[in-house]
Image (tube, rainbow, N blue to C red):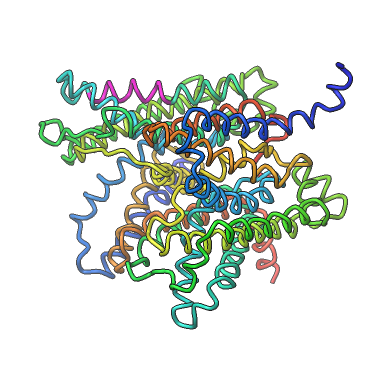
């Protein structure tokens, strides 16, 4: 029992230790990085974590969803505008964004479920439509609530409180519901899951819908943090998807078999540290997407080449 | 009659994109009249379509082995910036070969990431797209103008000439050489291809390099058309190319039905549709919505659900 407790503590320390060590190294290298940065980095990690938790469902069951960024954008624009025009306050923004997000995610799910088109193609096609639609609705102006008192998520305590709440929701969905169990079963072995009576296409379609829920939350938090959201075109929302995917890939690699919801948050935090490191070393912020893409490649490379690494390890140990 | 239809089903299906193109052309000729049929507008359509056709031809090779490439736009930007910077130091005489060689190297790199890194091709493409976009935004300044000697090439005749050469070579390679045949076989079943003694990785890599060459040529065409490299060079090319190729009848699952003609007809349909809707004074964002919906409808109607993996 003691051994097991030690193992759990060891795994979680490993998960948390990586960003902490990275931050300490960065502090040693640059005198401009202080503990104040740590808090703002934690806050910046909230947004990618939220979408990452949504993507966790998708990526676990083998879906490729490139529409989540455009869903978040459109949910913020439509939901935010509805709440703004009706004067519903920040609770209204959250509820409207989530409702719109679920509808948008549900459409992708329906498209997949009824047509059988691969999720990557369905989500790409939907992304073209959603991005363009964002430039059409509400005269293409997006949404601006900066003049109201609704921009509350810029506040540290609100942001963290909301992140914890959404994290608990993600944990509940992924680890405590039948749906979450089915998602994990489909992700482990689709054929066995199907023969066990799990309706795989239905589970996958539901995952796409749940991403809409998290995209709605992302849209609300983003709007509540910056106050202004403008339409984006030409696959511009891909950067948002990439950030979320990145959290999942690193999260899967460094969760040590433990809670992936917690792992995704800490890896989102790691990503923010890496972005800060780029700034410290004088790279412009335009390189952020390049670095994110680069790290995605590295982590997929690591996870897809375990057999090669094991082979090399065997050879080295023999020598 | 029924038997005749069964025997010629595939040929009839193959004619749909051409019939669609003719219908669209007729529709806009009747409704938009002089504006659509003016020599200036028609040459504009050809110029626009040529770039999509050239990138589409390369994408056909990638799609033939059941993969997707979404790097075109970013790769074009990257290719343009690297070649321009190199030519600035050496000589602009090397602009054409420079574009082709750099494009091929970019294709080779994307292919290596996919083949040797075991990373899905669309993710390797996205990474290349991000790299290209990021670097072009940082490196491009207003001085990156195409030298005057190349401006004289900005004619319909030159575009059609380039397209003809590229198309003939691509059709020959796809239909009559091992590269095309093996890539199509890999698209049908990579395991069977491997067991038949085909070096799957090598032929996939060659397809990526061909795609890179077409990206290089498209970059050169864009350079002479736009007159400069800007930080928006190549924006939206990947989506436009993908939509065009799918509309033209290229199967998303690749395989034996892959054909270069899909890129040519698809690019024409795409450009005529876009041009006609603009003449109808439709909002550009609505045009994008229509493009997306058309893409989805064509995919739903034509996708081969059994063979579709996109991770071959």
Asked whether B291 or A218 is in front, the reply is B291
Q: Quadrant of residue A117?
A: top right
Q: Quadrant of residue B8?
A: top right
Using the image, determine if residue B149 lies above or below residue A259.
below
Q: Is residue A98 magenta?
A: yes
Q: Quadrant of the C terminus of chain B?
A: top right
Q: Check the image and name the residue furthest to the bottom.
A: B90
Q: What is the x, y in percent for residue B2?
A: 86, 16
**Secondary structure character of the magenta stretch overall:** helix
Asked whether B82 or A55 is in front, the reply is B82
Asked whether B281 or B134 is in front, the reply is B281
Q: Is residue A263 visible?
A: no
Q: Which residues are magenta?
A: A93-104
Q: Is residue B244 magenta?
A: no
Q: Is residue A279 visible?
A: yes
Q: Please give left or right for residue B23 compared with residue A233 in the image.
A: right
Q: Please give left or right for residue B165 compared with residue A301 in the image.
A: right
Q: What is the x, y in percent for residue B12?
A: 77, 28
Q: Please give left or right for residue B115 compared with residue B103 in the image.
A: right
Using the image, determine if residue B189 lies above or below residue B162.
above
Q: What is the x, y in percent for residue B148?
A: 43, 72
Q: Quadrant of the N terminus of chain B?
A: top right
Q: What is the x, y in percent for residue A267?
A: 39, 48
- Residue at position x 56%, y 25% in the image: A112
All told, the count of numbered labels is 0
- Residue at position x 28%, y 66% in the image: A280
Using the image, determine if residue B109 lies above or below residue B280.
below
């Amino acid at each position: 029992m003691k051994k097991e407790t030690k193992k759990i503590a060891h795994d979680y320390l490993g998960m948390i230790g990586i960003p902490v060590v990275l931050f300490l190294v960065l502090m040693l290298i640059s005198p401009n990085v202080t503990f104040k940065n740590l808090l703002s980095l934690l806050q910046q990690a909230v947004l990618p974590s939220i979408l990452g938790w949504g993507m966790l469902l998708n990526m676990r069951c083998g879906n490729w969803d490139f529409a989540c960024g455009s869903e978040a954008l459109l949910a913020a624009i439509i939901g935010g505008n509805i709440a703004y025009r009706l004067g519903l306050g920040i609770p209204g923004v959250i509820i409207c964004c989530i409702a719109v997000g679920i509808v948008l995610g549900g459409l992708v799910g329906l498209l997949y479920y009824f047509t059988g088109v691969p999720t990557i193609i369905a989500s790409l096609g939907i992304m073209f439509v959603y991005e363009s639609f964002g430039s059409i609705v509400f005269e293409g102006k997006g949404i601006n609530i900066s003049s109201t008192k609704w921009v509350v998520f810029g506040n540290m305590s609100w942001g963290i409180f909301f992140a914890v709440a959404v994290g608990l929701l993600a944990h509940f969905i992924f680890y405590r519901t039948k749906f979450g169990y089915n998602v994990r079963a489909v992700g482990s072995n689709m054929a066995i899951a199907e023969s066990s009576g799990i309706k795989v296409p239905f589970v996958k379609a539901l995952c796409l819908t749940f991403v809409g829920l998290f995209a709605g939350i992302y849209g609300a938090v983003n709007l509540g943090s910056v106050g202004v959201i403008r339409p984006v075109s030409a696959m511009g929302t891909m950067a948002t998807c990439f950030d979320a995917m990145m959290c999942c890939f690193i999260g899967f690699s460094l969760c040590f078999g433990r809670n992936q919801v917690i792992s995704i948050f800490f890896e989102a935090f790691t990503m923010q540290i890496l972005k800060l490191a780029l700034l410290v070393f004088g790279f412009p912020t335009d390189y952020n997407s390049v670095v994110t893409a680069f790290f995605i490649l590295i982590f997929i490379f690591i996870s897809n080449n375990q057999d090669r690494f094991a082979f090399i390890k065997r050879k080295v140990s023999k020598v | 009659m029924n038997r005749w239809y069964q025997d010629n089903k595939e040929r009839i299906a193959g004619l749909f994109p051409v019939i669609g193109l003719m219908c669209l052309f007729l529709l806009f000729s009747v409704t938009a009249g002089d504006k659509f049929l003016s020599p200036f507008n028609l040459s504009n359509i050809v110029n626009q379509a040529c770039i999509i056709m050239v990138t589409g031809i390369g994408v056909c090779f990638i799609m033939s082995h059941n993969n997707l490439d979404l790097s075109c736009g970013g790769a074009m930007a990257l290719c343009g910036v690297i070649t321009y910077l190199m030519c600035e130091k050496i000589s602009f005489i090397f602009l054409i070969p420079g574009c082709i060689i750099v494009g091929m190297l970019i294709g080779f790199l994307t292919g290596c990431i996919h083949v040797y890194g075991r990373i899905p091709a669309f993710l390797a493409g996205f990474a290349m797209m991000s790299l290209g976009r990021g670097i072009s935004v940082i490196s491009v300044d207003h001085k990156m103008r195409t030298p005057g000697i190349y401006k004289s090439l900005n004619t319909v005749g030159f575009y059609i000439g380039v397209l003809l050469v590229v198309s003939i070579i691509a059709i020959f390679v796809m239909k009559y050489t091992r590269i095309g045949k093996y890539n199509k076989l890999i698209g049908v079943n990579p395991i069977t291809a491997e067991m038949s003694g085909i070096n799957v990785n090598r032929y996939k890599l060659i397809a990526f390099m061909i795609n890179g060459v077409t990206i290089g040529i498209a970059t050169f065409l864009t350079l002479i058309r736009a007159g400069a490299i800007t930080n928006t060079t190549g924006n939206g090319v990947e989506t436009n190319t993908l939509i065009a190729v799918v509309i033209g009848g290229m199967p998303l699952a690749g395989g034996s039905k892959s054909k270069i003609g899909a890129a040519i007809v698809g690019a024409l349909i795409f450009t005529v549709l876009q041009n006609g809707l603009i003449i109808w004074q439709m909002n550009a964002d609505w045009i994008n919505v229509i493009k997306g919906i058309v893409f989805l409808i064509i995919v739903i109607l034509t996708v081969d659900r059994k063979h579709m993996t996109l991770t071959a």
